[in-house]
Image: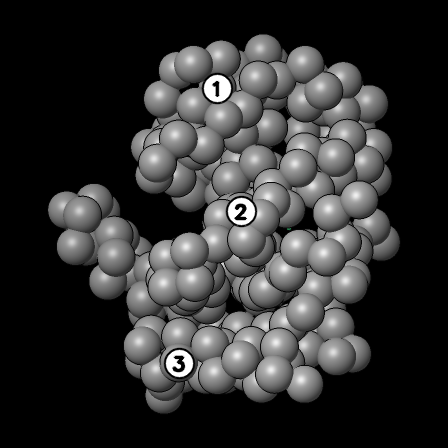
Amino acid sequence: MTNHIPVIAIDGPSASGKGTVAQIVADKLGFSYLDSGALYRVVAFATHQKNISWHDANAIAECAKALHIQFKQEKVLLDNQDISNDIRTELMGKGASQVAVHAPLRAALVDLQHSFRVSPGLVADGRDMGTVIFPDAQLKVFLTASTETRAQRRYQQLLGKGQPADYSNILLDLQERDARDKSRTSAPLVIAKDAILLETDNLGISAAVNIVLSNYQEKIDK
Ligand code: DC
């Protein structure tokens, strides 16, 4: 039983800043960190390599069960190969959102996600951390921002990396991805009843981190 180990669940849509906030919170508390989106991205990458259709629910789940995924420092390894950059492309983001609609795949990834809950605690970010994977999390946060703000952030990020970027395409892509993540029947992106809502349009990363930390402190002081 690992349920005494604290979890901070941070959910929200793409480019809401949840990954950055979650990582900093984990560092400050000395907790482990789970980037659950990376798991769906690895599955999109591996199935793409094996020519498995992103619509074939059973083949995707079977493929996922056989994968050897490791997180080492900041790197994501598949069968000991560093695929950190390969999974961060727009295509793999889209693929992750497509494979993630399938219930057999989501079921296949549950135990792996639970295995990240180790002492002294875990910060987990994704879409269903507080609703499905860690419903007993000590603190649940839903981090979001308007689609325009998020598209602007992604646009600046791509430009910063010297990659080609088209704001209108990014905006459309985010809208499409949000719609798919929210409307799927299996673990859709919703705000957990007991989550705190953080809108980050006008909130910097360090302010968001401080709000999460102070809410967590309040919860454990109770
Ligand atoms: O957080 P991200 O952009 O890396 O996630 C990529 C996709 O993975 C996202 O569009 C939906 C899916 N995902 C999911 O369904 N459940 C999660 N807990 C995390 C990600």
Residue located at (25% from left, 52% from top) = 158
Asked where in the image residue 208 lies, by quadrant, the reply is: bottom left
Q: Position of residue 156 (x, y in %)?
A: 24, 62
Residue 219 appears in view:
yes
Which circle's residue, 3 or 2, is located before the other in the chain? 2
Task: Give me the C-alpha separation between circle 3 and circle 2.
Answer: 20 Å
Disc marking residue 34: 2
Whether residue 59 sits left or right of residue 211 in the image: it is right
Q: Position of residue 51 (x, y in %)?
A: 60, 14
The residue at label 2 has a CB less than 8 Å from ligand 1:
no
Q: Secondary structure at mark 2?
A: strand
Q: Nearer the viewer, residue 44 or 111?
A: 111
Whether residue 61 sits left or right of residue 173 in the image: it is right
The residue type indicated by label 1 comes to: Leu
The residue type indicated by label 3 comes to: Asn
Which circle's residue, 1 or 3, is located before the other in the chain? 1
Residue located at (39% from left, 15% from top) = 81
Find disc 3 in the rendering and name its residue.
210
Task: Give me the C-alpha separation between circle 1 and circle 3.
Answer: 34 Å
Q: Position of residue 215 (x, y in %)?
A: 55, 83
Q: Neighbour class for label 2 at 10 Å: few (<14), some, many (≥20)?
A: many
The residue at label 1 has a CB less than 8 Å from ligand 1:
no
Q: Neighbour class for label 3 at 10 Å: few (<14), some, many (≥20)?
A: few
Q: Neighbour class for label 1 at 10 Å: few (<14), some, many (≥20)?
A: some
Q: Nearer the viewer, residue 90 or 194?
A: 194
Of circles 2 and 1, the one toward us is 2
Q: Are marks 1 and 3 in contact (CB under 8 Å)?
A: no
Q: Secondary structure at mark 3?
A: helix
Find disc 1 in the rendering and name its residue.
78
Q: Secondary structure at mark 1?
A: strand
